[in-house]
Image: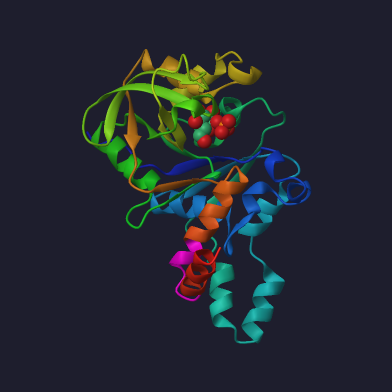
Amino acid sequence: MSSPRLRKVVFPVAGLGTRFLPATKVVAKEMLPVLDRPLIQYAVDEAVDAGADTLVFVTNRYKHAIADYFDKAYELESKLAEAGKTELLAMVQGTLPPHVRCVFVTQPEARGLGHAVLCARPVVGDEPFGVILPDDLIWNEGPGALRQMSELSQRENGAGIIAVEEVPHDQTDKYGIVDATALSERAAKINLVVEKPKPDVAPSNLAIVGRYVLPARIFGLLESTQPGAGGEIQLTDAIEALLAERSVLAYRFAGTRFDCGNKLGLVKATLHMALQDPQIAAATREFVGGL
Ligand code: G1P
């Protein structure tokens, strides 16, 4: 029996974005541009590439911009149409394909990533789903990271899949860290996961990156997950509980991750995208070479 295809993807976007203050006083961090597209657009494109038709944004009362961005912009669209600016019009209308719908749920209090994912339960219901943390921008020339993971999950009878990559040993306390036994070049069976361990007690340097394919069972486990690292309800702790019931795989995705939750990562992602853009690649290379 083949497992169901991934239809729903959750985007936890209720964070305050304090690393980008003062800009994030008024601009949601997910709306910060990487070249000409906001961070959230890269995440949404990856979800759509994975086959999703329902995007669930877990947001807070200050983040109207994300809903506005994916909404129809009547005035702008009619002005561009009247002026015959068809390319720009296509760009404005192309933020979301017509078959995809957005659902917004609020996370009333900032109680952690696990709690944010639990807020999406009424929309996700009883089917497997994806989670994308838009801060982690993953660029790949071929299929996106979530699509790679969804395909692996389908081959593995609906197993949970967590994206991982190696990080420097002294940075384990910024990530969920897994201990896993290799199954193939990219996939490994997770033995344990721990949220933000100090380097001296970390089981490895294999870190969770912001992409997950999870069974609906995770919601029940999240309900009984107690606050963990940082006093927050951690998704990692619910995944650790899931491991007692079924196998979950760690997956080394094909692609390059940019941690756009900090300034250097956002700069690197922007330069990378500039170098992919035929109109400005050469000038960007020249500028960077001259620094
Ligand atoms: C979250 C997760 C962590 C994961 C990280 C990836 O942490 O809790 O397990 O490694 O995302 O970006 P945060 O960055 O929200 O502190």
Left/right placement of residue 202 relative to residue 135 reads left
Magenta-highlighted residues = 273-279
Nearest the camera: 231 or 54? 231
Quadrant occupied by the C terminus:
bottom right
Pinpoint residue 175: horizontal percent, then vertical percent. Answer: 50, 28
Q: Residue at x 44, y 18 (%)?
A: 202
The extreme front residue here reads 290
Left/right placement of residue 228 relative to residue 186 reads right
Q: Residue at x 66, y 47 (%)?
A: 29
Q: Residue at x 46, y 65 (%)?
A: 275
Nearest the camera: 161 or 171? 171
Quadrant occupied by the N terminus:
top left
Pinpoint residue 94: horizontal percent, then vertical percent. Answer: 53, 66
Left/right placement of residue 234 relative to residue 149 reads right
Q: Is residue 68 above or below residue 14?
A: below
Q: Is residue 82 above or below residue 59?
A: below
Q: Is residue 84 magenta?
A: no
Colour scheme of this structure image? rainbow
Q: Is residue 40 above or below residue 158?
A: below
- Location of residue 183 by image quarter: top left
